Amino acid sequence: MTLTATPQTIATETTLPAGNARLNAIVDDVQAALIEVIRKHRVTDEEYRDATLWLMNAGTQHLEIPLMLDVFLAQAVDDLNHQITEGTDCNVEGPVYVAGAPELDAPCVLPQRADEPGTRLVFSGTVRSCDGTPLVDTLLDVWQANGAGEYSHFNPDVPEYNLRGKLRTDADGRFEFATVIPSEYPIPLGGSTGQLLAAMGRTGIRPGHIHFKLSHPAAQPLTTQIYFEGDPYLHNDVVGAAKDSLVVSPVHGVDDQGRPAATCSFDFFLSPVS
Ligand code: MBD
Ligand code: FE
């Protein structure tokens, strides 16, 4: 008798009525999609074992699984769940958000060192509802890397809460804070995600960006990121998250001490609570 390599149908266990039907359907589809990949690329025993080891290693590294999922899947989930036609586009939260950033009073300056790497930047703008009404007292939770691509809490040399802070819009819905322009940024590449990207020949770089979480009682919360015109990685983002609608054009000049400095502005529009 000759054995054929005809794919067998998947032998799945029968499921009990108490099982979660949605979970069942999703896990079945994930399994079917991966089996499709295995068949399409004729995955070998050795490759299967390598993948198992790679995942096992990732699981032993702090924050490596969330980083890996954010690199490959987060923007798809984000886009699907925020298909809002009005309002500012959303963008992935990413793995480096830290709760508990200090609340800043006007004039707001994101916590930073005297010699913080990066061009000085004053970022201003407004927060409005989609009909244009200023949203007074909107909370903006802001976090970013510096001009050397370093985030606090993820780089041992950077002080806690460096370039992280919370501020509020004023009576006209305006906000303003002083910071530095974040540079293009290699995601943390020291673990399994970096190992995979390097093996694939990818550089693992994101365009420079500032993260925002905006909240106001009369509006839907918004998590997004702002990018900078001219950044060479805008269309070559390892996470595939950068969107044209979220790009600002900084105006370059000098500050009152003659140092290079820039300004930029962005108006956020929040969707009404449904
Ligand atoms: C980041 O800083 C980030 O913003 C995303 C989305 C993924 C990895 C690192
Ligand atoms: Fe980031």
Image (spheres, rainbow, N blue to C red):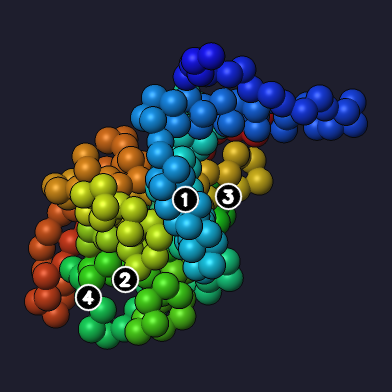
Q: Mark 2 = which residue?
A: 150
Mark 2 or 3, which is nearer the eye?
A: 2
Q: Residue at x 27, y 60 (%)?
A: 185
Q: Mark 4 = which residue?
A: 117
Mark sitting earlier along the chain (2/1): 1
Q: Are marks 3 and 4 in contact (CB under 8 Å)?
A: no
Mark sitting earlier along the chain (2/3): 2
Which three-letter amino acid code belongs to the residue tagged 1? Arg
Separation of disc 2 and disc 4 at Cα?
9 Å
The location of residue 177, given as percent across then percent down, is 36, 64
The correct choice, above or below, for 7 with respect to 124 in the image is above
Q: Is residue 40 shown to the viewer in this render?
A: yes
Q: Mark 3 = which residue?
A: 215
Separation of disc 3 and disc 4 at Cα?
29 Å
Question: What secondary structure is found at the residue carrying circle 1?
Answer: helix
Mark sitting earlier along the chain (2/4): 4
* The image quarter in which residue 139 lies: bottom right
* The image quarter in which residue 187 lies: bottom left
Q: Does residue 169 appear to the left or right of 118 in the view shown?
A: right
Density class for disc 1 (Cα within 10 Å; few <14, some 14-19, many ≥20) is few
Mark sitting earlier along the chain (3/1): 1
Q: Are marks 3 and 1 in contact (CB under 8 Å)?
A: no
Q: Is residue 94 shown to the viewer in this render?
A: no
Which three-letter amino acid code belongs to the residue tagged 2? Glu
Question: What secondary structure is found at the residue carrying circle 4?
Answer: loop
Question: What secondary structure is found at the residue carrying circle 2?
Answer: loop
CB of mark 1 near ligand 1 (< 8 Å): no
Nearest the viewer among 251 and 65 is 65
Mark sitting earlier along the chain (4/1): 1
Q: Which mark is residue 236?
A: none
Which three-letter amino acid code belongs to the residue tagged 3? Ser
